[in-house]
Amino acid sequence: MFKLKNLAKGTLSTQLLSGGGTFSLQSGEGAKFPDTGSGNVFVGVFWSVSFASPEGDSNAEFVTAYRTSGDAFSVTRAQEGTSDHQWEVGDNFSLVASSAVFSELNETKVTKATTSSDNAIVRFDGTDGDAVQNSGVFIGDDNTLAVNGPNTTVSVNGSNVTGGLGVWVDDGGTNKAGIGIGKADSTSASAGATYYGARSRGTLASPEIIEDDDLMTSVIGLGYDGSTFRLGSRINHEVDGTPGSADMPGRITFHTTADGATVTTERMRIDKSGNVGIGTTSPAQKLDIASGNVRIDTTTGATPYGIIYKGSDRFIHNFNYGLNGGGITTTGQNTFIGINAGNFTMGSMATASSSCFVQYGYRSEYFDFQHDRVSELRDRAVRPLPPTRQGIRTLR
């Protein structure tokens, strides 16, 4: 990339013969030009001291040059359609933004070299002979944008995947995010920073409607296994039905990779109806669990854990809560079903509103039904069973 510097102009202190490759300027004038080194090439022009500017000199010669040290330069002669001439002491030399400089910019290649104080690199369309850089911002000729890396390609399960945007962070800690999205807005509580993932069929120029089961957006977690990045988890946003005008049914599916595997398996989904399925892809209720169990915590001391509520009332729980105005009791592994441990219990005393009570133990010799059923019990007898069947009561 040609270097530029404002007001870089000097006069020759040595003669430059036709075909010559080096020259020097007057003392101190070299500092007006780009830094020394072959990586700091610029476009310059020679013209005679007899003319105020190169436009008036028909023998003006365009060259490419770089400063070798102090006021000394190395030069490549006769550039951009001009001819090699002999230049004398006192003739003019200046850095210019010539057509070659603008042509290079127009080829969409810009590189800002890395220094100890400035590590920003912007590169377009390949290296074109420049040293390959591994940090900065890169815009490729395939319309990809890479930040802090030369490309947007990553190896996943042994196969290369190229994204439109790649952000690479080599930080060694947790204080730097790969991508940050921020927004300031005082107009609405819902106007937060938003990530969009949009999908269509067809092309960007001519998008077409997507179809049932199409993947709209996926968020994927990858981990390096020593040789390649492997799938660890993913969250998919998919079409859940036939879409149409102003109609886009959707679902979210959650996937994890099992121990010893390299591909993810769906574990849970929320479908278009709001039903949650765990272990099933067709949840029929608000919570549908297949091929597995549900575990809830147990009550410890006076802490009411392990409760399933019906509205605001405890409906299924494993402790006796508020019996006859009392507090929580946790004796045994009891299960209570009903509003506030009311309608059906097994293994402990029921409340007065219960409809059925079964007590293990030979001395429990009664049933406690709701009041509108008491009359039906008067004509029935409770028959104790032999000791071998203690704990069971029947109605005859």
Image (cartoon, rainbow, N blue to C red):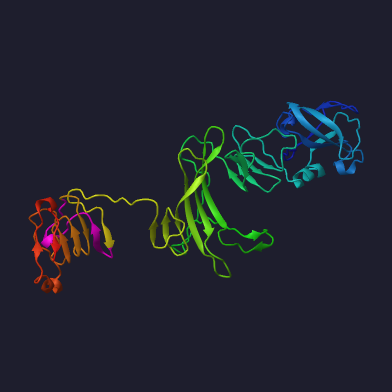
Residue drawn at (69%, 62%) of the image: 206
- What residue sits 46% from the left and 36% below the top? 173
Measured as percent of width and height from the top left, residue 49 is found at 87, 35
Query: Residue 144, position in %: x, y?
Result: 65, 47
Front residue of 22 and 130:
130
Residue 197 can be seen, yes or no:
no
In the current view of this chain or complex, which residue is farthest to the left?
363
Tell me how many marks there are: 0
Residue 215 in magenta stretch: no
Classify the position of the C terminus by image quarter: bottom left
Q: Which residues are magenta?
A: 310-330
Q: Residue at x 60, y 40 (%)?
A: 154
- Tell me residue 288's x, y (percent): 39, 58
Is 172 left or right of 86, judged from the image as shown?
left
Q: Which of the image's four quarters has the N terminus? A: top right
Looking at the image, which is closer to me, 83 or 216?
Answer: 216
Q: Quadrant of residue 341?
A: bottom left
Q: Is residue 43 left or right of residue 281?
A: right
Residue 321 in which image quadrant: bottom left
Left or right of 25 on screen, residue 276: left
Quick one: 94 or 40, which is closer to the camera?
A: 40
Say left or right for 167 vs 142.
left
Can residue 166 be seen by looking at this rendering?
yes
* Residue 121, image quadrant: top right
| Image: 105 above or below 271 | above
